[in-house]
Amino acid sequence: MEFDTIAAISTPMGEGAIAIVRLSGDEAVSIVDKLFKGKGTKKLADVPTHTIHYGHLIDPETEQIVEEVMVTVMRGPKTFTREDVVEINCHGGLVTVNRVLQLVLKHGARLAEPGEFTKRAFLNGRIDLSQAEAVMDLIRAKTDRAMNVALGQMEGRLSKLIQKLRQEILETLAHVEVNIDYPEYDDVEEMTHQMLIEKATYVKKEIERLLQTAQQGKILREGLSTVIIGRPNVGKSSLLNSLVHENKAIVTDIPGTTRDVIEEYVNVRGVPLRLLDTAGIRETEDVVEQIGVERSRKVLKEADLILLVLNNNEELTPEDEQLFEAVEGMDVIVIVNKMDLPQKIDMERVKELAKNHPLVTTSLLHEQGVDELEEAIASLFFEGSLEAGDMTYVSNSRHIALLNQALDAINDVIKGVEMGTPIDIVQIDLTRTWELLGEIIGDTVHESLIDQLFSQFCLGK
């Protein structure tokens, strides 16, 4: 498969010590060769692969020095894209790096589309689709655990398991075809049914095992949407600041200070929390505060976890009890704050309202109880199982949806065999399972979906 030569800035925009402009394609070396002048007369076309060279980029039209650079030459197929790749290391800065990029574009390269380098790695067979998606997950990972899940997927852990299942299905389909073609043996139908049940049950168990990790994997990939709720001035903003370890929210003694939803990512025991501090949910005449309260109610409905904060120094109010009703059926951790002040709250009633939900006491002013809260959050969603290093985690929503569809299809296979459905009909569901699993790694995926997936990547990756 032949492509033109693409180029893009592969480091974040802004000021920095170093920036990198990356080129990939058959003309990558020759394009930079026109512009690069190193020590001596040696051309980049003659240098060994995977070597780096000091010199300057010269504009051929003006013969002026554009930038002092280090140029890395890597020849395919032992590169990320399996094409010739050249990386130009220059000084970091908006003007500097853009001058280098414009120079290589002017002399034969094309500006890469978002994710096009990774897309070429996929199209050239270096990685499959699930590994390509893991590249973006790795870039976006907000905790070590999330990074480890992405690394495992990049290394092909999920791909190998999917390929193994597809091979099992393919061999089963081949056996079924042989048995259909040679029906003269009396026991062939019974053998075929028995084999189908055994193989389909094995595939079903493996898919179910993967789906068991889906909730945890998805949380690690996307973050646990966590909402802090409570009446005004119970300590919600203080809780946000304690978890973030920064003063992101305004903390005052004035009820209703938070007028909007404040969002922040927090690393809690390796679990990424997308933490939302909301305006206190209460009846108010303040128009601006009313808007904040409405946003809080909307965010509440979409949350994965609720942190419901109460004030130890105040009696329970009807508003507090209404909050418990509002979060009925959700994952909730109840926090009784301001334990450093005299107790006025009815703790027995709080325990009754909390039911089976975890209950944590804190004094955020004195930073007490935060460790216990973090432990409660980690235990609620992961129960210690996340440390299993040999597990294959499914974290991508597209993969989860396809696995659920594949599970339905394999269940139809088992049901069909048990009901005595003709083998050729059962084959259709088995083939459908094979195709759905293939969509995860990109073997049976439509071209428009590939374009859509890679368009979400950052430029230069």
Image (cartoon, rainbow, N blue to C red):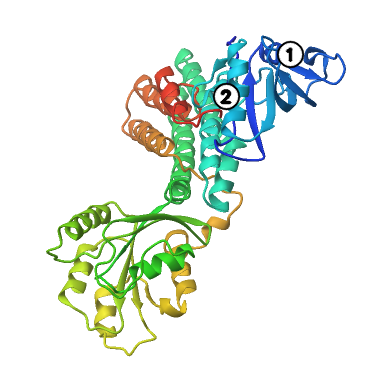
- Three-letter residue code for mark 1: Asp
Could you say which quadrant of the image residue 35 lies in? Answer: top right
Q: Nearer the viewer, residue 335 or 440?
A: 335
Q: Nearer the viewer, residue 36 or 323?
A: 36
Residue 177 makes an appearance in the image: yes
Give the amino acid at mark 2.
Ala
**Could you classify mark 1 by the number of other residues whose Cα lies within 10 Å: few (under 14), some (14-19), or many (20 or more)?**
some
The residue pinned by badge 2 equals 8
**Looking at the figure, which quarter contains the N terminus?**
top right
| Front residue of this view, candidates 184 and 416 | 416
Q: Quadrant of residue 157?
A: top right
- Tell whether 12 sits left or right of 243: right
Question: Farthest residue in the right direction?
Answer: 40
- Identify the mark nearer the N-term, 2 or 1: 2
Q: Nearer the viewer, residue 140 or 372?
A: 140
> Measured from the top left, where is residue 124 in percent x and y?
60, 18
Mark-to-mark CA distance, 2 and 1: 17 Å
72 vs 82, left or right, is: right
Indicate left or right for 316 with 380 as reference. Answer: left
Residue 234, placed above or below residue 108: below
Q: Which mark is residue 33?
A: 1
